[in-house]
């Protein structure tokens, strides 16, 4: 059965980067193979911090779900009027300064998301997150999991991008070394052949 193009390219790649005693494989080829292996190992190890970051985001989301509370806040100023952002839609949220009371009766003020055009003095129900931020409501479990997954994948992709850039940079330097070595080898061969021609 004939090999597909992808299979042939993979086979050539493995032949180039495998570790053996092939005399045709130069030192620069072996260094590139070592660099590739190191980059692959480091990429795999980056899964540890990626999982840790995802876990931290998930824990924060769960804490926001469980430890926040609803508050009744009163607008201290009129919210900006609705603004057309496209012919088919309108802005559905804006921010305005509000005042609310903590569980111990302490009066707080802050900026919260509200419906555009809401008048001053209107009471709105908002979710007070554990960090003191006012939002429209608690995060649901799907949002928590999604944020955690995106955070973990983002860390892994960032690490992969940095490692790929490093590998390509090293490979470019090695390609220059290889080209210089080939030029030197051809020059030496031309010199030997020239001597043989004159001696013959």
Image: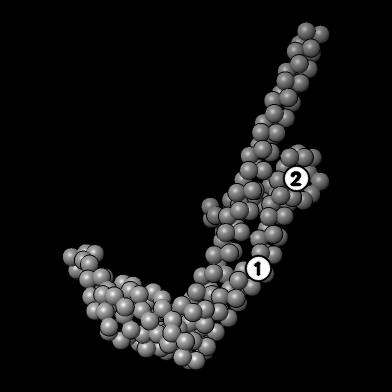
Left/right placement of residue 9 relative to residue 29 reads left
Q: Looking at the image, which is closer to me, 131 or 33?
A: 131
Per the rendering, the mark at residue 100 is none
Is residue 138 positioned above or below 86 on the image? Answer: below
Indicate the position of residue 115 as horizontal and vertical percent values. Answer: 28, 78
Q: Nearer the viewer, residue 106 or 24?
A: 106
Q: What element carries label 2?
A: helix
Element carrying mark 1: helix
Residue 140 is at least partly visible in this image = no
Q: How crowded is mark 1: few (under 14 residues within 10 Å), some or many (20 or more)?
A: some
Q: In this view, does 157 lie to the left or right of 16?
A: left
| Residue on which the image places disc 1 | 49
Residue 43 drawn at (x, y percent): 66, 60
Quadrant placement of the N terminus: bottom right
What's the residue at 68%, 55% (across, down)? 39
Count up the numbered dots: 2
The residue that mark 2 highlights is: 30
Residue 168 visible: yes
- Disc 1 to disc 2, C-alpha distance: 30 Å
């Amino acid at each position: 059965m004939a090999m597909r193009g992808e299979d042939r390219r993979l086979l050539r790649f493995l032949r180039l980067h495998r570790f053996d005693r092939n005399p045709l494989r130069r030192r620069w080829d072996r260094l590139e193979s070592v660099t590739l292996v190191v980059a692959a190992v480091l990429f795999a190890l980056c899964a540890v911090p990626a999982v840790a970051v995802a876990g931290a985001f998930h824990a924060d989301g769960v804490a926001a779900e469980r430890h926040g509370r609803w508050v009744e806040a009163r607008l201290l100023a009129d919210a900006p009027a609705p603004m057309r952002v496209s012919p088919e839609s309108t802005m559905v949220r804006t921010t305005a300064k509000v005042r609310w009371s903590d569980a111990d009766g302490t009066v707080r003020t802050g900026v919260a998301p509200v419906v555009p055009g809401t008048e001053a003095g209107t009471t709105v129900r908002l979710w007070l997150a554990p960090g003191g931020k006012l939002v429209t409501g608690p995060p649901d479990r799907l949002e928590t999991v999604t944020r955690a997954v995106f955070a973990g994948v983002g860390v892994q992709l960032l690490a992969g991008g940095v490692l790929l850039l490093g590998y390509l940079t090293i490979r470019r330097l090695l390609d220059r070394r290889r080209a210089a070595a080939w030029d030197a080898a051809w020059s030496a061969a031309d010199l030997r052949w020239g001597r043989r021609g004159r001696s013959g």
